[in-house]
Image (spheres, grey):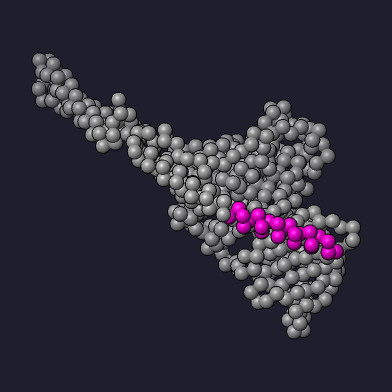
Amino acid sequence: MFDRLRPRQRTLAFFALLALACIGGVAGAMVLADSRLDHADPRSALISAGLMACFGILGICAVMWFIFDDMVVRPMERLAAAMQAHAATDMRRGIDIEMARHLGDLAKGAAALTARLSAAREEADDHLTRYTSKLAAEREYLTRILSAIPAAVLMVSPDHRVALYDGHAAMMLDDQHHLGLGQKVFDYFDETYLRAALSNLHASGHGTLDQQVATADGARLLDVTLHYLGAEQGYMLSFPVPRETSPARPVVFDFEMTSRTATGDIAEMPLRELTYVVFDTETTGFLPNKDEVVQIGALRVVNGQQAPGEVLDILVNPGRPIPARSTAVHRITDQMVKDAPAMPEAGRKFHSFARDAVLVAHNAPFDLAFFHRYSAQIGAKFDHPVLDTVLISAVLFGVTEGHTLDELAARLDVKILDEHRHTALGDAIATRDVFLRMVPMLEARGLTTFGALLNEIRKHKRLLPDMNETPKPAAGAVKVRPVSG
C-alpha cells in the first residue's frame, strides 16, 4: 500500500500511524489503570498508567524510527553516495531505483540525471578517443625510435626525480632498485658524482657534456652524456648499452613531473600528486603471526594513473606446504612456488618497488603484518604512509554500509574478472581501480590532501588500526581479516 503513495502522502501516513500508535498506547494504559482502581490506590494506579504510557510511547517511537531509518534515512544516504560517485567519476552504470524506491520521484529524478550525465560523457569520450589514438601511435613510434638507438635515456625533473625512462635504462639500472617514475635519480647514480657532473655542465655553458658517473652502488662507472633542458624542465642523461640489449619496457614518461616539486610535508601534498603503490598478498592462511605469503602483487600509480609497465607480480616460497583450503581460494600450489624466492628476497623486491610511495591496500593491517614480521630479515622497515580502502569507504559511505572489495567494486562500477579474483595482482588491480574512483569523491568533499584524508580516516579506527601511527602493530596483532578482502 505504501508504494502507491507519493512521498508527502507516505510521510503523512507515517506520522499518522505514529500518532495513532501513541494514542493507542495511552488509551491502553488508561484502560489498564481503570481496571486496577478497584484493587489499588487510585494515585498508584494513575502513576503506573503514566509510566506504562511513557514506556509504550518510547517503544513505539523506537520501532517507528527503525522503520523510518530503513525506508527513508538509509536510502537517502545510499542515493546521495551514488550521485556523488557518478558526479566525481566516469561511472556508466545507472542508479538502481530499487535501493530508494520509498523516496518516490527523487530516486527516479536522480536516475534520469545520472543517465544524462553518462550519455554526455560517452559523447565526450568519442571525441577524446580520436585524439588519444593519435597520441598512442606517436608514443609507439617514439618507443621504436629509441629502442633502435643503442643508448639508455633518462629525463630528470629539476628536483632530481625520474620523469622519463626507456627500456634500455630499465634493464641497465633495475639491478640496484626498481626504476620507476618519480623515483630519485640518486637511487641509481652516485649523488656526489652526478652533482659534480651537473656543476661541470652548468659551468661549461654548453647544452651537453660527457662525463663519467658512478652508479649508486659503486659497482660501475658509466660514460654519461648530460643534456641541460632548462631551469623548469630539468636535464637528461643518456649512456651506452650493449648492442645485444633489448628493451624490457616501452618509454615511460610523465612530463608534468618536471614542473612539480615536493612540499616536504606529505600532509600538505594533494592526493593527485602523490605516488602510490597499490598492493595485495595471497597467503597460506589468515594468521600473520603464523602463516606465510605465497604471492605479492603491486602496481605503481603516478599522477593519478597506472604507470605503464610498473607492475610487480611474484610468487613466494612459503617454506611449508600450502593448505588445500588456501589453494582452493588463490589457486597457488606447492609446485608453482617450489623455485620462487623466499619472503626475505621477495620482501626486498617489494620494498625497492614501493620506496618513496604511499602504500594502498584493502585491509592493509593484514597484508603489512607479514612484511613487518620479516622486516629484520628483509633488512628494511616498511614505514611508508598507508591508505586503506576499507577506511576510505567508511569515510565516503558510512560505517553501516558493506566495505568488502567486492561490495566496493559493485558500488563503484568496477569490473573484477572471476579469474583475477583472489590473485594478488588481480586484487591489487581491483583495489587500484576502486581507489582511483574514490579520489575525486574525496576531493568533492574537500578532502584534497593526504593530511585532511588521514584526519577523517582516524575517526574510523574502530574498524581497522591506523597504519600511519607509530609504533607499528606487532606482527601478531592482527589475527584474522576483520573485513573480507
Residue 338 x/y as whole percent:
82, 36
- Rendered view: 272 above or below 414: below
- Rendered view: 409 above or below 205: above
Let me know if residue 240 appears in the view.
yes
Residue 339 x/y as whole percent:
83, 39
Does 268 sit left or right of 133 as displayed? left
Viewer-closest of 160 and 229? 229
Query: What is the count of numbered marks?
Result: 0
Viewer-closest of 373 and 92? 92
Numbered range of the magenta stretch: 128-150
Viewer-closest of 184 and 123? 123
Does 466 sit left or right of 317 as displayed? left
Let me know if residue 179 appears in the view.
no
* Image quadrant in which the N terminus is located: top left
Does 473 sit left or right of 411 as displayed? right
Magenta highlight on residue 349: no
- Rendered view: 299 above or below 329: below
Residue 482 x/y as whole percent:
56, 37
Residue 45 x/y as whole percent:
14, 22
